[in-house]
Amino acid sequence: MEFHYEVSGNDFARAGLASSEIKKTLQRLGLPHEVIKRVAVAMYEAEINMVVHAGGGVADVRIDKELITIIMCDKGPGIEDLSKAMEDGYSTASEQVRELGFGAGMGMSNMKKNADEMYIDTAKGKGTCVTLKIRIPEHS
């Protein structure tokens, strides 16, 4: 199964819509709660980063028998200092975004904690693609 979503930038009313839709799909498929939770958290964090920092982007999700692959790509400014961005609490979000309750600096680390594999392709001025892979254990 494959899904494609457009993520609008700076649209906080629709932020999280794609991850919410994927969560519902995984629930309908009867996947284990722990897998659903990990996918929802990781994808939501990536989606919010696109809304806050990159002017939006696209989300592609592939659900196979043993693996869920999430690819989130934007055409934003890229991540200037990736190692710094991975630190808990580090954020480049504006004060306005923080006042809305976003930009706490936990997005990247939450993605990493909830994914079995995480790859980031970014370059200053060229945007960012984050690939998250979450394995599905055998279940009945």
Image (tube, grey):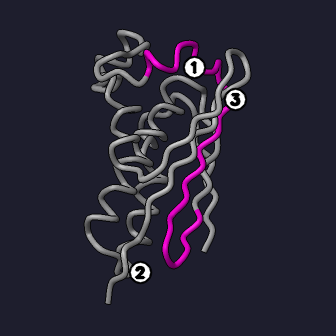
Calculate the distance from the C-alpha at mark 1 to the C-alpha at mark 3. Answer: 11 Å
Q: Start and end of the magenta stretch? A: 62-85
- The residue nearer to you, when weighing 106 against 120, is 120
| Residue 29 numbered mark, or none | 2
Give SS at disc 2.
loop
Which residue is identified by label 1? 79
* Mark 3 element type: loop
Residues at discs 1 and 3 in contact (Cβ within 8 Å): no
Question: Outermost residue, bottom direction?
Answer: 140
Q: Nearer the viewer, mark 1 or mark 3?
A: 1
Image check: 115 left or right of 133? left
Location of residue 64 with respect to 126 vertically, above or below:
below
Amino acid of disc 2:
Leu
Residue 31: x %, y % from top left: 35, 76
Instruction: Mark 2 and mark 3 in contact? Answer it, CB < 8 Å.
Output: no
Q: Amino acid at mark 1?
A: Ile
Q: Quadrant of the C terminus?
A: bottom left
Disc 1 crowd rating (10 Å Cα; few below 14, some 14-19, many 20+) is many
**In percent of the image, x 60 and y 74: which residue is there?**
1
10 with respect to 115 (left or right): right
